[in-house]
Image: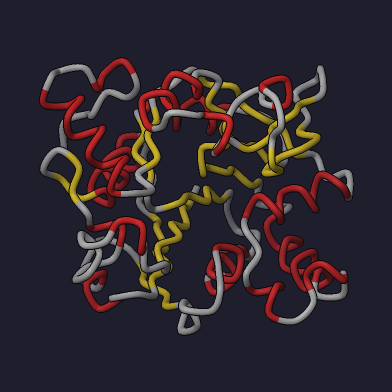
Amino acid sequence: MRAIILAAGQGTRLAPFTDDRPKCLVKLAGKPLLSRQLAALAAVGIDDIVLVGGYRADQLAGWPHTLVVNQEFTSTNMVHSLFCAQGALDGSDDVLIAYSDIVYETRVLRALLAATGDIAVAVNTDWRALWQARMDDPLSDAESLVMAPDGRLLEIGQKATGYDQIEGQYMGLIKVAAAQAPRLAQVYDDMAGLPHYAGAAHGNMYLTDFLQRLCDLSWPVYGVKIGGGWLEVDSVEDLTVYQDLAERGELDRFCRLEPI
């Protein structure tokens, strides 16, 4: 198993903390987000790690990973960054794809890695309490996620108009079986021919857009339901909420920060 961590974006919603560093090096409870994620990966034996940098990528050199740089980070998004590391999707090993602005307990990772199937997506079923701690109106920010009775993912990443469209929230963690990994690039390339992703929109698509396309093409994409144990650090407000909860000893009800 190898991991690709996507860390190219500037993280403007975390400014001023990202004025002088990439988003993954912002600290939560005294430790960089990247340190926390690398510790979780090490705990399950994953040490083959590719980090896709962009903004202030020079600060990511020297960490225990292979660094690939998305030179177009100012005009592209997650999926483009993923395929900057296309060499790691060569079919020689299963691949974990991870956002860099997340923190998760080792149990989350173990549950995802234990899932069968070609593509598995971690889904937080306890998302609503976390969103309520982060914002006044969870529905204003949450995205749709609908699964079939057998766990196959049907819809992801759309604007939700009601809680009935949300079985959980995507956690920014995807496991891809080795046999399927080399096929992903062709799907991405073909999406350039779709009207919605023509021109600059192709490079700017989100990973949820890409996952939705895989679902629409009947790829075997399955959700793995996991109760909590995860944080998304998307904004200064998020960081403030988490730091306050940690100082009061209450962050564990959402995610236990494991010692590193």
Q: Quadrant of residue 161?
A: top right
Q: Position of residue 196 (x, y in %)?
A: 82, 67
Q: Quadrant of residue 147?
A: top right
Judge by depth and name the residue closer to the eye, 78 or 41.
78
**Is residue 46 depicted above or below 256 in this figure?**
below
- The residue lying furthest to the front in this view is 136
Task: Indicate how the structure is coloured in the image.
Answer: secondary structure
Judge by depth and name the residue closer to the eye, 4 or 135.
135
Q: Residue at x 15, y 18 (%)?
A: 249
**Is residue 20 depicted above or below 36 in this figure?**
below
Query: Relative to residue 35, is residue 97 drawn left or right?
Result: right
Q: Position of residue 189 (x, y in %)?
A: 77, 73
Q: Quadrant of residue 228?
A: top left
Q: Position of residue 153 (x, y in %)?
A: 76, 33
Q: Position of residue 33 (x, y in %)?
A: 26, 48
Q: Quadrant of the C terminus?
A: top left
